[in-house]
């Protein structure tokens, strides 16, 4: 294992390695009223960029929590539509700088749209596709740009934003591309996909089946790096933690999606989250994690 070898020359690795080795070893179970067992406690390392188990647990918790908020917000805006939006950034040689840049640029984009919707700026002087956004859920995805070639130094990473936008009118990809180029100073590759969701579905599970893959694509930002070599995952974690002094927050909600009480990351999956995990699961497909529904038939 890479971290075991690294701990022999780098003393700062040892504490992380100890927590990784103990992750998931201590589990506590309780009895339900029907006599069945449920996981009621446990010890987890919470190093999401290093530990695939904790990354999977956090993905399930976030997807379960935000799915309910998105569903309820849609009931208040029956004429609005969900869109999956991807924004790319031309990479530099510094991962922390790229993460900070794309966070700054997306904040700038949303702030302009919010000011126009609130009447603080004139739509005639400041045109933006972000003015169509009622709510958004966005994460920062980090991938290795040059493949798993460990001999190439320095490692260069590709940073992009994945988001779910709830819009009252359809955003136009060509206009967003030009706007994104102006904000970033050169990056123009964007992608907008109409999420074919059953917005008026009364049954929550039927609705989730139509939007689940896009929701997981946003909430599984920790898993995007879990297929990389241990050395690359450690490098990502080390760079981001060194830049900010803590693990960076790469998921942000805005508008009507804001204000969700995030789940307890230390505790086990709740009963609802465990049922959610039984019905919906993630699988690795080529270059991304994909959501699939379990066929219970």
Image (tube, rainbow, N blue to C red):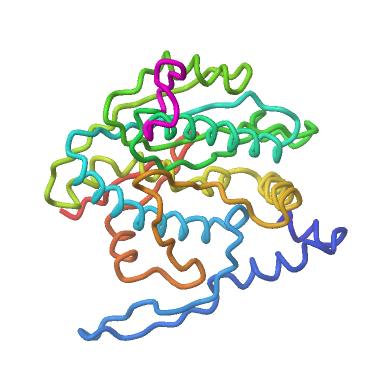
* Residue extent of the magenta highlight: 117-130
Q: Is residue 259 above or below residue 138?
A: below
Which residue is located at x 40 percent, y 79 percent?
40
Residue drawn at (17%, 39%) of the image: 78
Instruction: Residue 118: say if magenta.
Output: yes
188 to the left or right of 297: right
| Residue nearer the viewer, 276 or 161 | 161
Magenta segment, principal secondary structure?
loop
Residue 4's x, y, as percent?
76, 61
Q: How far across and how far down the image is residue 62, in percent?
A: 41, 55
- Judge from the rendering whether residue 194 lies leftward or rightward of residue 163; answer left or right: left
Q: Residue furthest right?
A: 9
Q: From the viewer's perspective, is 123 left or right of 194?
A: right
Q: Quadrant of residue 146?
A: top right
Above or below 139: residue 270: below
Q: Residue at x 54, y 55 (%)?
A: 52
Q: Is residue 126 above or below residue 154?
A: above
Q: Locate residue 17: give its quadrant.
A: bottom right
Q: x, y (%) of residue 203?
A: 13, 51
């Amino acid at each position: 294992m890479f971290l075991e070898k690294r701990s022999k020359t780098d003393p700062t690795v040892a504490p992380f390695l100890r927590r990784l080795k103990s992750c998931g070893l201590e589990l506590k179970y309780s009895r339900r009223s029907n006599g069945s067992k449920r996981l009621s406690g446990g010890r987890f390392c919470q190093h999401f960029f290093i530990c695939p188990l904790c990354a999977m647990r956090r993905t399930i918790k976030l997807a379960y929590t935000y799915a309910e908020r998105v569903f309820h917000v849609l009931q208040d805006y029956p004429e609005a539509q969900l869109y999956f939006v991807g924004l790319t950034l031309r990479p530099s040689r510094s991962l922390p700088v790229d993460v900070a840049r794309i966070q700054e640029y997306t904040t700038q984009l949303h702030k302009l749209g919010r000011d126009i919707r609130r009447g603080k700026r004139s739509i005639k002087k400041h045109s933006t596709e972000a003015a169509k956004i009622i709510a958004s859920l966005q994460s920062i995805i980090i991938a290795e740009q040059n493949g798993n070639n460990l001999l190439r130094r320095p490692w260069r990473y590709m940073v992009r934003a994945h988001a779910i936008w709830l819009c009252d009118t359809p955003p136009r990809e060509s206009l967003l591309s030009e706007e994104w180029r102006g904000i970033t100073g050169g990056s123009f590759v964007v992608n907008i996909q109409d999420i074919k969701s059953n917005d008026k579905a009364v049954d929550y599970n039927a609705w989730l089946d139509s939007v689940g893959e896009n929701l997981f694509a946003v909430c599984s930002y920790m898993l995007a790096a879990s297929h990389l070599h241990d050395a690359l995952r450690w490098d990502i974690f080390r760079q981001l933690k060194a830049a900010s002094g803590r693990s960076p927050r790469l998921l942000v909600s805005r508008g009507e999606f804001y204000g969700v009480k995030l789940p307890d990351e230390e505790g086990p999956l709740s009963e609802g989250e465990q049922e959610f995990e039984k019905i919906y699961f993630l699988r690795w497909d080529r270059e991304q994690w994909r959501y699939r529904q379990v066929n219970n038939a």
